Amino acid sequence: MEILIIALVILLAVGMFRYFRQKNFLKVLTEDQFREGYRKAQLIDVREPNEFEKGHILGARNIPLTQMKQRLVELRKDKPVYLYCKGGSRSARAAQLLHKKGYNDINQLKGGFKKWTGKVKTK
C-alpha cells in the first residue's frame, strides 16, 4: 500500500513540474487573443491529416504531432508559432518539442479546435 501511495505522489509531482515548466515557455491564448496574432505567425494544426481535412482554421498548415520532429525544417525560429489541435494536449506536446529545439515564441489555442468559432475551411 505504501508503494502505491509513493508512486501516486511521484506521478503527481512530475505532472505538476511539467505543468509549471510549460507555463514558462507556452502562452495559452483565448480565441480572441489567438485571432489577434495568428495571421502574422506560423499557424500550425498538429492533428492528423484526416482530422485536418474535415475542417481547420483558415490559413493553417498541417504538421501532425507524429511528424513534427521530421518536419521542423518547415518552421522558422524567428516568427511566432501558433499551435492547435482538437483539445490542447497534442499542441502542448508539440510546444514542448519546439521549446527543446530552440523555439521561443510558442502559443496555443485554449480549448483547441473544438472551441474555435471563427472561419473554418474544409476539403
Image (tube, rainbow, N blue to C red):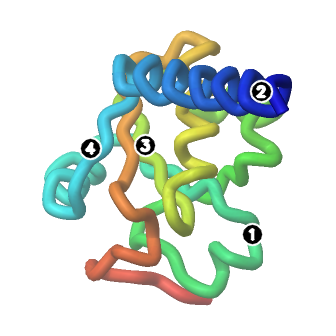
Q: Nearer the viewer, mark 2 or mark 4?
A: 2
Q: Nearer the viewer, mark 3 or mark 2?
A: 2
* Image quarter hosting the C terminus: bottom right
- Name the residue carrying label 1: 49
Please say if the residues under marks 3 and 2 sit with CB atoms less than 8 Å apart: no
Q: Quadrant of residue 95?
A: top right
- Name the residue carrying label 3: 42
User: Label 4 amino acid?
Assistant: Lys
- Name the residue carrying label 4: 40
User: Label 3 amino acid?
Assistant: Gln
Provide residue 111's location: percent of width, then percent of height: 39, 63
Q: Nearer the viewer, residue 4 or 19?
A: 4
Which numbered disc flags the more N-terminal residue, 2 or 1? 2
Q: Nearer the viewer, residue 28 or 36?
A: 28
User: Label 2 amino acid?
Assistant: Ala
The answer to whether any part of residue 78 appears in the image is: no
Provide residue 74's location: percent of width, then percent of height: 64, 35
Q: Is residue 78 left or right of residue 8?
A: left
**Residue depicted at x 36% and y 26%:** 23
Binning the other alpha carbons within 10 Å of mark 3 as few (below 14), some (14 to 19) or many (20 upward) gives many
**Would you place residue 57 above or below residue 102 in this image?**
below
Total numbered circles: 4
- Name the residue carrying label 2: 7
- The span from disc 3 to disc 4 (Cα, nearest Å) is 7 Å
Q: Is residue 38 left or right of residue 33?
A: right
* Image quarter hosting the N terminus: top right
Binning the other alpha carbons within 10 Å of mark 2 as few (below 14), some (14 to 19) or many (20 upward) gives few
Q: Nearer the viewer, mark 2 or mark 1?
A: 2
- The span from disc 3 to disc 2 (Cα, nearest Å) is 40 Å
